[in-house]
Structure formats: structure tokens, C-alpha cells
Image (cartoon, rainbow, N blue to C red):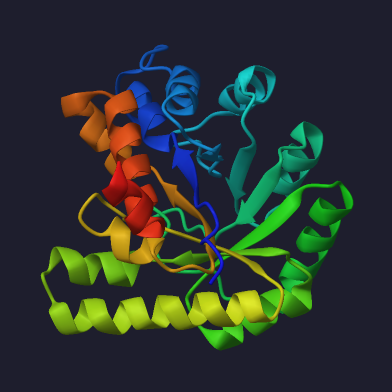
Amino acid sequence: MSEPSALRLGVNIDHVATVRNARGGDVPDPVRAALIAEHAGADGITAHLREDRRHITDSDISRLMSQLTLPLNLEMAATEEMLSIALRHQPHAACIVPERREERTTEGGLDAVAGHNHLQRFVSELGGADIRVSLFIEPDKSQLDAAKRLGAPVVELHTGAYCDAAIADDGAGVEHHLRRLTEAAQYGASIGLEVHAGHGLTYDSVKPVAAIPELAELNIGHFLVGEAIFVGLQASVLRMRALMDEARHPMSTAAQ
């Protein structure tokens, strides 16, 4: 039996910028947070440039691109403005997500089935610029098939329903949503997609998801930034990294 592959950790630094923007000024600095996360073992940095610039700003993206040595994953809506920004900066990856002005965070996955005609040009133009395109979708076979038809090489499975069930201590719900994630990861990998997952993961909920062998990357942000208030960002990232490694390589970590 082959050794499970390594699981990458992408750290989303949006909510460092949320705290900064609550008062204005320059602190706390999301670029500094990205560099700390890199030192703590993150494999990539995620930043969501929203239409209303509620947290990450255009200057943050410019500074991240100039200072990071890790890959930058730009989360973006499928709009002309965001496409122009992505093509100008050329981050390593762009994850297309749904976006509505009234939502506090990205709620639910992109509908790649109904949105095929709209999304096609964005996927094609980003891919043509050597930007690795990802679609943030629900763990659903039809959405995976739609992502494949669009030519997106990567999908990120929305883990929100699983995490909500875990917070509610709903054992049946956790089992149901974890099964959906597992089956979606297996199916996605079987049709040639690279499968990521994220949204709402915590220390308590991450290990069952991290143990899914077909997943290549988890993207985690809000919880890590919140936990950093109490223990520091380096410590919160280090612990998340350790929990992911324990889930993916339980025998190796037990022997240490």
C-alpha cells in the first residue's frame, strides 16, 4: 500500500485585514501575517479581494505578490474587474467563488452547472495566463462534472455544512457531510481534478477531513486568525499543521 501524499495547508489572511480595517490605518498587517504563516509551515497564502474591499485591498495584493515566496491563491468573483486584476498580477492560482454584497463570508459553493456559460471565459482567460484555476463548489457530482467540462484543473470543496454539524454536535450530520466530502473527493480525483477543501475548519473538525486521501490541500483562515488572538499566529498555524499531519500520517506521528 502506497504512503499517503502530503497535504498542503493554505492559510487565508483575509481577517487580519478585517481587524485592520475596523479602525483604519496599517495594523495589523496581512502581509506580515502571511510571512509568519509561511515561517510556521503554510504551503500557500490565500487572499480574497472582494468587490467592496471589506478586508483585503488592492495594495495588499501588490505587496503580497512582491514579498511572498509561497504561492498566492487569489479568491475572486467572476467579474470583469476581478479578472483584470488577476491577469495584471498573475498570482499562482485563482479560486473563483460566489460573492454577494450582503454576506459576511462566502456562503455556499459556486453553481458551476447553471453558471457554465458565464464562467467559461473566466476559466479560459485565467488558464491561458498560466494562472491555476480553482472553482469553489459544493461536494456534489454534478458540480464536479461541470468543473471538468469548464476545464478547471482544481476544485475546492465547501466544508461549511460539515463544520456546522460538528459545531452543533450533530453526529448524524457530521457523518453524512463527511461521507459527501469523501465521495466527492474520490470522484473528483477519478476524473482528473485536483481536489482541495475548506471553509469553517477548526482544530476539532479538521482531522476527519484531512484524512481523506484524495485531498491535496486545505484552505483555512478565520479560525487560525481568531485563535491567534490567544496564542499567536505562528502557534495556531503550527498546531493546525500538526493536526493535519497526524490525520494523514497517523503511524508516523505516533512513532515520534
Q: Residue at x 10, y 70 (%)?
A: 169
217 above or below 171?
above
Relative image position of residue 201 (x, y in whole percent) = 31, 55
Q: Residue at x 65, y 81 (%)?
A: 190
Instruction: Answer with left or right where residue 22 lies relative to residue 113.
Output: left
Instruction: Answer with left or right where residue 169 lies relative to residue 101.
Output: left
Q: Residue furthest bottom?
A: 142
139 above or below 132?
below
Relative image position of residue 244 (x, y in whole percent) = 37, 51
Q: Quadrant of the C terminus?
A: top left
Figure label count: 0
Instruction: Answer with left or right where residue 252 lies relative to residue 8.
Output: left
213 above or below 207?
below
- Location of residue 249 by image quarter: bottom left
- Location of residue 114 by image quarter: bottom right
Q: Residue furthest right?
A: 128
Q: Note whether residue 143 is visible.
A: yes
Q: Residue at x 37, y 65 (%)?
A: 209
Relative image position of residue 202 (x, y in whole percent) = 26, 51
